[in-house]
């Protein structure tokens, strides 16, 4: 896990994706906008391990990852009493309408790649505020 | 065909359709979430028990009116995605269950 300097007032976003370039750019982008502390995680399994001792304000979750995919990670998070309330936003290259529709059945939102970092921030803002 | 059998067939087909596009564990979470969301408006949804891939429906659902059951199924279909779900359900449902649902007024196109 790569973690930025802790800032007490900032909400914490856990970003889960197997693509290191995306982890870097989204973390950099969101943190440069000043609103969030972003914790990056490279796999679904590591995400679940970390959630045993950390409770982020929101999880940004890639769907297509080796090992455990985002659908199963989401199901594990939502079936655990300790983590079920954490909002999940799928970040994915899957743009077909079926995946989009399926993606919002158990998650807070579904955002397709590529995305504008400001649009992503606005979506996160609205979910966290609600 | 009875409400009990058609409800079981409907849920099994729906869970399978969602699972084929996601995963079985996600599908079960999603469908239980939808059922929970509708539980205030449709008290009889408590008679439907979903655990993993398995669906059991209590026989007291047979006393629910077809009109009420129709509203329930329509809500689920609309929440998941009416266009493609109807097409896929029409392909997956037992023909007798499909005909029972069509008699209720659910049009599968």
Image (cartoon, coloured by chain):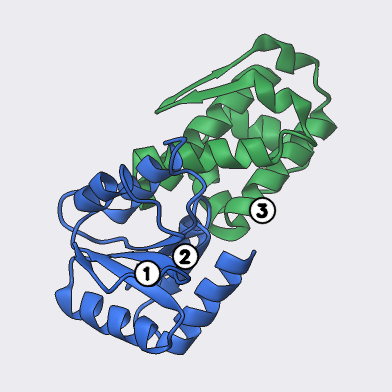
Chain colours: A blue, B green
Q: Quadrant of residue A22?
A: bottom left
Q: Which residue is mark 3?
A: B78
Q: Quadrant of the N terminus of chain A?
A: bottom left
Give the Cα separation between the discs numbered 2 and 3: 14 Å
Label 2 packing within 10 angstroms: few (<14), some (14-19), many (20+)? some
- Residue at the spot 46% in from the left edge and 61% down from the top edge: A98
The front one of A24 and B50 is: A24
Give the Cα separation between the discs numbered 1 and 3: 24 Å
Q: Earlier in the sequence, mark 2 or mark 1?
A: 1
Query: Can residue B1 be seen in the rendering of this structure?
Result: no
Mark 2 or mark 3, whichever is nearer to me: 2
The front one of A127 and B82 is: A127
Name the disc covering residue B51, or none: none
Query: Can residue B73 be seen in the rendering of this structure?
Result: yes
- Residue at the spot 57% in from the left edge and 67% down from the top edge: A127
In the depicted structure, whether residue B101 falls above or below residue B64? below
Q: Quadrant of the C terminus of chain A?
A: bottom right
Mark 1 or mark 3, whichever is nearer to me: 1
Could you say where residue B61 lies in the image, as x and y percent from the top left?
72, 17
- Residue at the spot 42% in from the left edge and 36% down from the top edge: A80
Q: Which residue is mark 1?
A: A91
For residue A126, side relative to residue A34 (left or right): right
The front one of B63 and A46 is: A46
Q: Are marks 2 and 1 on the same chain?
A: yes
């Amino acid at each position: 896990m790569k973690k930025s300097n802790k800032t007490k007032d900032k909400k914490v976003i856990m970003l889960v994706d197997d693509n290191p370039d995306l982890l870097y750019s989204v973390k950099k982008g969101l943190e440069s906008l000043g609103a969030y502390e972003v914790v990056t995680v490279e796999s679904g399994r590591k995400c679940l391990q970390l959630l045993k001792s950390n409770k982020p304000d929101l999880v940004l979750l890639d769907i297509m990852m080796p090992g455990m995919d985002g659908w199963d990670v989401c199901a594990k998070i939502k079936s655990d009493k300790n983590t079920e309330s954490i909002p999940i936003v799928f970040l994915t290259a899957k743009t077909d309408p079926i995946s989009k529709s399926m993606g919002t059945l158990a998650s807070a939102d579904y955002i397709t790649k590529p995305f504008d970092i400001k649009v992503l921030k606005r979506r996160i803002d609205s979910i966290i505020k609600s | 065909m009875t409400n009990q059998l058609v409800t079981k067939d409907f849920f099994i087909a729906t869970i399978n359709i969602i699972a084929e596009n996601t995963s079985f564990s996600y599908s079960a979470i999603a469908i239980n979430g939808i059922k929970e969301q509708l539980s205030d408006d449709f008290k009889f949804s408590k008679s439907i028990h979903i655990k993993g891939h398995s669906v059991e429906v209590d026989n007291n659902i047979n006393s629910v009116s077809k009109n009420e059951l129709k509203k329930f199924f329509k809500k689920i279909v609309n929440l998941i995605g009416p266009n493609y779900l109807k097409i896929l359900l029409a392909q997956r449902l037992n023909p007798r269950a499909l005909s029972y649902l069509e008699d209720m007024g659910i049009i599968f196109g």
